Amino acid sequence: MEVQAAGWRTPAAGPGRALVPEGLRLVAFVCATWIATDIGFASYRPEFGVSLIWPLSGVGLLWAATGDRRTWPLDAVLLTAVSSAALVVAGSTTGQAAMGALQVVLQATVYQAVMVRWAPALWGSGGTRPLRRTADLWVFLLAVTVGSAVASGVRAAGLGLVPTSDLQDASLVLARNLSWMIAVGGVALQLGPRLAPGGPRPARTRPEPGPRAAPTDRTWRGGPLELLALAVVTLAVYGAVFTREQPLPLTFLLTVPSLWAAMRLDALRAAVHAVASGTFAIVMTLSGNGVFASMDDPRVGAALAQALLAVLVLKTLVISCVMSERDAAIRRARVSEAASLGRAALLGAVLHNMNEGIVVAREDGEVLVRNAAGDALLRSSVMLTTLPDATRGRLFHPDGTALDEAELPFRRALAGEEVLREDLVLRSDSSPDGRVIEVSASPVAETEESPRAAVVNFRDVTTVREHEGDLAAFAGVVAHDLNNPLTVVSGWADSLADFFALGDVSAEDGQAMIGRIQGAATHMRRFIDDLLGYTVARDRPLSPEDLDLSAVAEEVARLRRDGATHPHIEIEPGIRVRADVVLLRQLLDNLVGNAVKYVAPHTRPHVTLTCRPAGDMVELRLTDNGIGIPESMRQRVFETFVRVQTDGYGGTGLGLDICRRVVVRHGGDIRVEEGAEGVGSTFVFTLPRAGARLPGLPPVERQQVAVSPEPTA
Ligand code: ADP
């Protein structure tokens, strides 16, 4: 017979091969075959021409399971030779001996072929696995049944070697062949993998749940006391049923010890217990004791006793397979439960740490998920899924119209719409102007367990939108302020071209026009310089150091003193601060520049810079004798592009904004007051004193953008 499975085809792959050296294995099997044949023939009943029991069929199974394809021819020859020799020696006819040998070889071959074909992963048929799964159990049952049926059929046919069997004989032969295969196979398929090198060992502790939890052996959880109790109960029950002349009707009790063993012992111990109990029953029956011995026909009694053996072992196998699979299923469930919990915890942590608000809610309003950021943002993020009375009339479109329930992004998402980054305005008592909330919403896939739901995510974009608005206004002003001088340049350049085309332009006219062009260009350059200064003041990384502010201010003043108005600038010496030198120079240059610029005509500017300590800071006062700043404008002059005086004073409206940014980035503040004795202005600002630790850099607070007046051309 051609055996298909790769495992049984490769000699080294049979784990049983490594159990014992080959020679020893053969000797052991020769002995076992001889003994089993002798035992079987000892139960031979000449009046029926049949042996009542036939353990040799189990030994044949073992030959096949521990060998491989290469050893099987020799195994089969030896099995035939030894069993037939043992039968002849025991006193059988040669026909009986031949039939006995033929049966056992056929039975083992058919069994092994089925096992190798359909359960190649099991120990004994090419693999290493013990019998732990119900699917394998079915294959085992098929193999022993087909093997026994073929052997019994041949025996019943007689083949001219023995007389043909009647029904009782055939049934007995089938029962005895089948039961010894089940008994020996049931134990061997548990024990073999344990003895095989590298095979699974019985677990000492309960197996840890693993992601690929497969049926493993159930652990023996009881102690020696329980084993002893089980042995005592088994002996008592079997003794009561099988030892009395007139047995008590206690046969039903036979299920108790076997059930106990199957539920509490590991698969191997339980199988050994079943085989021991069944063998006891057979021995007692053959010796004329017990319920089965009371049958009129000894063949029926023997068949029943051997059927009991088969049933006991099968019951054990079924229970241990089912329980192993149940344990594996529980372990898998635990693993996936742990994985789900882990994923849920991770998701919770992610949600918790998100800056965006998230709400997942069902159509009926039940909130499934919400996060802290969302609740903090809206007090209650639930209001984005429904409009309770408390919040009705608080959500608006950006154009100011109130939102009704159907317009809520959540409701629209439930209706199947994908809402992508829409702005809503949320007004509350604390922010009557409203916060701008950017909201997205999408439907969540509908399943049977969870009816329609939608996920809403949102974030506060008030500052972002203000920034965007400011940036747009800023760009508009910059474009406008650059466009004006450009118009001047191109206008006068065109005029100059026209004059030249006419061929007659006086030097006086030409110089006047070129002067305008130069003026406009100067204004543009100043504006661009201021823009660069503005960017530096805002974005330059701060590198504070201990500085002599007086020295920096002197440098600035020296350049100014050369100006047309010959300003008088007095600086208190020895002022030391901790600051970024580039930004500090910008600050002083803007303040001193303004002080000498904003003076009445024909007035010589007079500027003083003084200082006094203020804790970790120093307070500086820059006083001028200029035109002063009206009280109503003293705060606004620090805003971007805000100018007070335009006539006759060139400027961009960025200088004081730069000053404010520089001071604030150093942790100080700046304001403007009326000058000394009601004349001019005094700019008061603070900076960290030298050696002081620079305070944390507070963000520069938001500024309103005002469109600057027309630049002077
Ligand atoms: P500008 O480029 O116009 O000088 P600034 O931001 O430096 O822009 O100043 C804003 C406005 O504040 C100026 O237009 C001017 O009207 C007023 N200003 C600034 N400094 C002084 C000062 N020392 N005396 C009077 N007015 C001043």
Image (cartoon, helix red, strand yellow):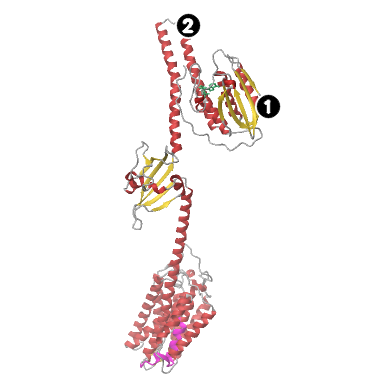
Rendered view: 305 above or below 365: below
Q: Is residue 423 left or right of residue 631?
A: left
How dense is the environment of label 1, judged by Cα within 10 Å: few (below 14), some, or many (20 and up)?
few
The amino acid pointed to by label 2 is Glu
First-in-chain label (1 vs 2): 2
Give the residues drawn in magenta, as a range: 274-296
- Direction right: furthest residue: 574
Residue 696 image offset from top left, x and y in percent: 58, 38
> Cβ of disc 2 within 8 Å of ligand 1?
no
Instruction: Kindly tell me whether residue 600 is visible in this rendering.
Output: yes
Q: Along the line of sight, which residue is nearer the eye, 458 or 316?
A: 458
Q: Along the line of sight, which residue is nearer the eye, 465 or 506?
A: 465
| Quadrant in which the N terminus is drawn | bottom left
Tell whether position 17 is magenta: no
Q: Along the line of sight, which residue is nearer the eye, 85 or 147?
A: 147
**Residues at discs 1 and 2 in contact (Cβ within 8 Å):** no
Tell me the SS state at disc 1.
loop
Q: Is residue 315 left or right of residue 685?
A: left
Tell whether position 293 is magenta: yes
**What residue is shown with label 2?**
508
Q: CA distance from mark 1 to mark 2?
A: 51 Å
**What residue is shown with label 1?**
574
> Cβ of disc 1 within 8 Å of ligand 1?
no
The amino acid pointed to by label 1 is Gly
Please tell me the numbered disc located at residue 404. Answer: none
Residue 319 occupies quadrant: bottom left
Residue 229 image offset from top left, x and y in percent: 51, 83
Tell me the SS state at disc 2.
helix
Rendered view: 511 above or below 578: above
